[in-house]
Amino acid sequence: MSLHDRPTVTEILAAVRGYLNDEVAKTSDRRARFRALIAANVLGIAERELLSADEDARFEDERLRTLGYVEGAAAERRRRLCADIRSGKFDSPERFVAGFAYASEMVARKLAVSNPRYLKR
């Protein structure tokens, strides 16, 4: 629940994205049309990120805890995980599979925000 009334941030992003797609992108000026489509795409990314942020944070927190990274902020735990991978602490088959699963899940979540059509291929 937000302190702010409607329109919500996601509604504003969707409205501006719709305007760019429905109005500006139909101009005969190819450069303006191209830039409008890029801007609409960026707004779509921002909207999807806002909508998934809480769930993505919970998901990553759970996965990092499963791997044994409990203390600290998610970014710090992620850095420790990467350092441990580089140092060889994930070379055993079990740890490798667990680390690979974490990385695969996080990449899929990032793609769902940045380019959801890529996952549908």
Image: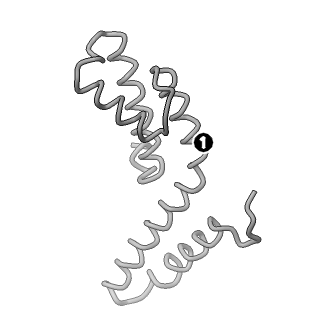
Q: Does 19 sit left or right of 40 as displayed?
A: right
Quadrant in the picture for the C terminus: top left
Residue 109: horizontal and vertical position, in percent?
A: 47, 42
Quadrant in the picture for the N terminus: bottom right
Type of colouring:
one colour
Residue 103: horizontal and vertical position, in percent?
A: 38, 31
Name, please, the residue furthest toward the left.
Answer: 87
Q: 26 or 35: which is nearer to us?
A: 35
Q: 73 or 12: which is nearer to us?
A: 73
Pointer 1: residues within 10 angstroms few (<14), some, or many (20+)? Answer: few
**Which residue is pictured at 29% across the width and 17% down the height?**
89
Q: Please, is residue 89 above or below residue 81 in the view?
A: above
**Which residue is pictured at 29% across the width and 10% down the height?**
92
Q: Does 60 sit left or right of 80 as displayed?
A: right
Q: Does 101 sit left or right of 22 as displayed?
A: left
The quarter holding residue 106 reads top left
Q: Amino acid at mark 1?
A: Glu
SS label for mark 1 = helix
**Which residue is pictured at 57% across the width and 49% down the height?**
52
Residue 20: horizontal and vertical position, in percent?
A: 50, 79
Residue 120: horizontal and vertical position, in percent?
A: 44, 43
**Which residue is pictured at 75% across the width and 65% down the height?**
3
Name, please, the residue furthest toward the front.
Answer: 72
Q: Please, is residue 92 above or below residue 9 in the view?
A: above
Q: 104 or 19: which is nearer to us?
A: 104
Q: Which residue is mark 1?
A: 55
Q: Please, is residue 80 above or below residue 53 in the view?
A: above
Number of numbered discs visible in the structure rendering: 1
Q: Does 45 sit left or right of 35 as displayed?
A: right
Q: Please, is residue 74 above or below residue 38 in the view?
A: above
Name, please, the residue furthest toward the bottom.
Answer: 28
